Image (spheres, coloured by chain):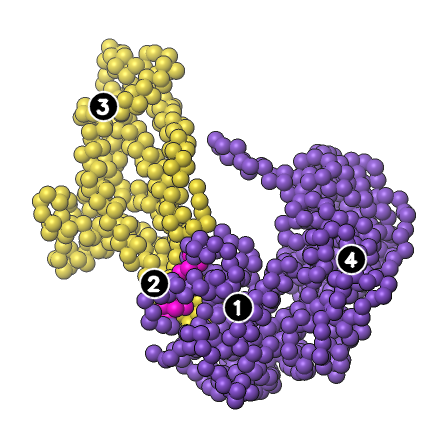
Amino acid sequence: MRNLPLDSDDTGCDTDREKPVLQIEDLAIQIGGSAARPVIRNVSYDIKPGETLCVVGESGSGKSVTSLAIMGLLPDALRSCGGRVLLDGEDVLKASPARLRELRATRMAMIFQEPMTALNPAETIGRQIDEVLRIHTKLGRKERRRRVLAMLESVHLPDIERIYDAYPHQLSGGQRQRVVISIALILRPKLLIADEPTTALDVTTQKQILALIRELQQKHNTAVLFITHDFGVVAEIADRIVVMNSGQVIEVGTREEILAHPREAYTRMLVSSVPSLVPKRREAERNEVVLDVCGLSKTYADKRLFRRGRPVAAAQDVNLTLRRGEIVGIVGESGSGKSTVARCIVRLLDPTSGTIRIHGSDIAQTSRSHLRPFRRRIQIVFQDPYRSLNPRVKVGDAVVEGLLNFGTPRDDAMAKAKNLLRTVGLDEEAIHRYPHQFSGGQRQRICIARALALEPDVLVADEAVSALDVSVQAQVLRLLDEIRERTGIAVLFITHDLRVAAQICDGIVVMQNGRIIEAGPAEEVLTAPRQAYTRTLIEAAPGRGWDFQNFRPLQIDSAKPADAMQPKQIH
Amino acid sequence: MLAYVVRRLLATLPVIVMVAVVVFAMLRLTPGDPAAIIAGNDATAEQLQQIRQSMGLDKPIYQQLIQWIAQLLQGDLGVSLLSGTPVLGMIGDRMGPSLVLAISTITLTVIIAIPLGVTAAWRQGRLLDRAIMTLSVFGFSVPTFVIGYLLVYLFSIQMGWLPVQGYRPLSDGFGPFAERLILPVLALSTVYIALIARITRSSIIEVMGEDFIRTARAKGANEHVVLMRHALRNAAVPILTIIGIGMASLISGVVVTESVFNLPGLGRLVVEAVLARDYPVIQGLILLFSFIYIMINLAVDLLYPVFDPRIRY
């Protein structure tokens, strides 16, 4: 059994600190045994103890595949075909499976994006953390339990005895991510690989998890390889940054170098695509009201045979109005009720009470059959473009479906579909193709074209850009704005991302626990919030101190001296 | 949990009543006069009248139904037309061999099928996996009675290792009891082993793609632990469902197997009763099988939370 640094004294001396924990040299990865072009090429970077290295890139850039290669956890279809990955001087690409298992959790550990699925649902939290100790140490039961509880305490989980015996589904997302961190760090590895660990979390939870990783890193001088697509997070935590694109390293540099003086055009494009938190000033237009929601509530009663379940209010007393040509954002964390409101407004859900007026007619309680004529007045675009298009229906048929339902002849509808696809920036030949032949951003354009086909008055966009990369996100947001300009459509824009909301919304409504807690013009809500919760949300938005469009730290704006805008010190 | 069990048991009552009514109606809906069927071709008018009276057939139909239900509630399944003995007693006498056959079959199936499925999933796409899957296609393609006769031909007639057929209770000693049970259990198990091995394989392969499997590997767990501790338990719910369905369909398998191996169990009783048109016995057996079916379903539902803590009643 190897000697493990289980007890608190740090064995690292100064010379050790200078030597990189991880050195990647010319790593190449290919698909299967084929001699085809490698999917990852010439990837080289290193990390020193105590350092945070952020690997950024859009989906498909190879940032996650590289990290799985370090852990020896590549899926069967992929294998490394060149270069070296030196962990403490040992090439892990040449290590035997048994040696790799020894290294995992002791020298290198990993935390993952999706805390909801990263834990075994059938085992208690305690057992899952304990498993690491059982695999790698010969400690007795009592000592292991003591260490697991100590670890749970150090990730600041409350009520650790109860959590030890709890199952994953009994914990929130943030709590589960703390458990995953416990599993990764209980043996104090020298290298922690964090693969988008906060992407699935709310901003306020994200902030706490980032702070926790930082705290544990400083305590044990851990090298952190942090993979993310979010430049806000990068600006918060990175010492150095690696930018990747299509399987290659584009640029490596310190945070200052990459964020303030990027050399490569691709890096410049990526950094400047990050939407600003400061909203553009917009002229308030006083067009006619197209959507007027008043006192909207949705309660779920969980029905049981003998007992009456406790009613759960998903939305309560929601009031909002939307004028022609206006974009109103509903922002809030998960569970705030923003999607419930969106789905009630398009009547995918039946509201419990309240009114929803479209051009003056109330559709809140209209029966399904009478609702039909109103359906074309209001359309929706969903979050996940990969799942909101039927994979077996051609794009053209998907776009014209609504038109055909309302009696447009097929030829006319198809001509219109071609037009719409051009409007959203796609080739009109797209009508003959299937959704899987398009990228995520293109699919979302198709969804927008489909929603626009019926020329609705109101478009509801439910987290419509959340699943997209920043550069694509920026394009789709521009597209929505253009369409609004051209057609005068009113957009209800649901998002958890304040940057996106700042970019596109005229008005912002902040929701928490099913209620609206603040509403007003975007500029007012984001720069001079009246409610403490709104302030918390803004403060939690990562990278607040950086002006990405202009490649510089954010200056304290004299016009709006909101103390929330204090930039982070950059040296 | 207890409240759930009580609720589920209460919910079975309407089902049982419905089955009872259907069984009752079955006899009345058979073409012709049940009394005439029972009495046979040579019966005189007085004999027919007598039978009608003794069966209560001269009363209005709703009274007959009430009487039938009332009898049922007292545990009275009526009397066999053939032997004149109470149906309940006949079922009790024949229960033993069938229970032994069914329980042994399920045990053997689980012991063989789950390791086979896990192995196949572990070696997915390799030779061993393909071999197991090919055998399993064979296993559920060949009818039980063919396998039964094949086994008899090989092991009893050619090799002379085991008796051809028959049954001895455990009280006659374990040897004679067991040697007559081996072939029927093997014959009946084949199809279930094939089915459950396949389901085990596919549910494990599905679970192996989950994120928490990657977490387990990132902990440094070896593949054995990953498969047995993390994957198998999470794959258990679909496997359990199929075992439950398999147990219910075992009832028909028992009928065939008991006929092939001449075991004096409920399956043989079904065949005898049908051939002799012994309606009260058929009624009683249908009721019994429905009841068993419902109880198996309940048991499976109650077992789910053991494997998946997210399921709570």
Of the image marks 4 and 2, the number of the one nearer the N terminus: 2
Which of the labelled discs sits on residue A526, or is there none?
A: 4
Residue designated by label 2: A142
Q: Horizontal and vertical percent for residue A327?
A: 81, 53
Q: Main secondary structure of the magenta part?
A: helix
Question: Above or below — where is A125 with respect to B103?
Answer: below
Give the residue furthest to the bottom. A15
Task: Let me know if residue B256 is in the magenta part.
Answer: no
Q: CA distance from mark 4 to mark 3?
A: 85 Å
Pointer 3 indicates a residue of which chain?
A: B
Residue A184 or residue A347, whichever sits in front: A184
Determine the CA span between mark 1 and mark 3: 70 Å
> Element under label 1?
strand
Q: Which mark is residue B79?
A: 3
Q: Colour of chain B?
A: yellow
**Residue A407 is drawn in which quadrant?**
top right
Badge 2 amino acid = Lys
Quarter residue A525 falls in: bottom right
